[in-house]
Every structure is written in C-alpha cells, then in structure tokens.
Amino acid sequence: MRAKVEPILGVMKGRFGVTRVRYKGLAKNAHHLFVSCALVNLVMATKTFI
C-alpha cells in the first residue's frame, strides 16, 4: 500500500508545494488540500504508463 501512495505524495509535494499546513483556518486548509488532491488526480491521469 505504501508503494502506491508515495508517488502521489511526491507529485503533491513537488508540483503543488504541499509541505506544511499553515494556520489560516481549517476551512482554507481543507480547501487547499482538496484542490491539490484533485490536481494530482489530473496529473496522474495524464501520465502514460508503459
């Protein structure tokens, strides 16, 4: 399970800068996380696996 999750977290950290949570409100932190997850899904879907 860990091997499936780590590339996704790498894309999240590398491309979208998801490293730490800033204390600017729970709603804003949740929104940033959800948008980042959606964008990672789009990035991972466009990759071609051979």
Image (cartoon, helix red, strand yellow):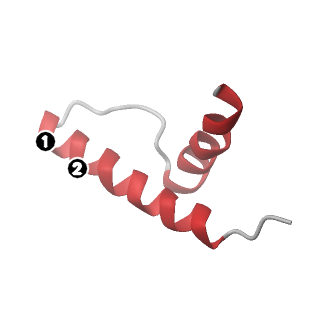
User: Is residue 25 in sight in this rendering?
Assistant: no
| Most distant residue in the top direction | 2
The residue labelled by disc 2 is 31
The N terminus sits in image quarter: top right
29 lies left or right of 20: left
Q: Is residue 48 above or below residue 22?
A: below
Height in image: 41 above or below 27? Answer: below
Identify the residue shown where x is 41% and y is 51%.
Answer: 37
- Residue in view at x 18 percent, y 45 percent: 28
Q: Residue type at mark 2: give it.
A: His
Dots 2, 1 in contact, CB < 8 A? yes
Q: Is residue 31 left or right of residue 7?
A: left
The amino acid at mark 1 is Ala
- Residue at mark 2 to residue at mark 1: CA–CA distance: 6 Å
Instruction: Please name whichever residue, 35 or 50, is drawn nearer the observer in this view of the structure.
Output: 50
Image disc number at residue 27: 1
Q: Is residue 26 visible?
A: yes
Tell me which residue sits at (23%, 41%) in the image.
30
Residue 39 coordinates in the image, percent (x, y): 44, 62
Residue 5: which numbered mark, if any?
Answer: none
- Looking at the image, residue 17 sits to the left or right of residue 10; the answer is left
Helix, strand or loop for disc 2: helix
The residue most toward the right is 50
Q: Please give the name of the residue rendered at 61% of the width and 50% of the height, measured from the top-left corner.
A: 11
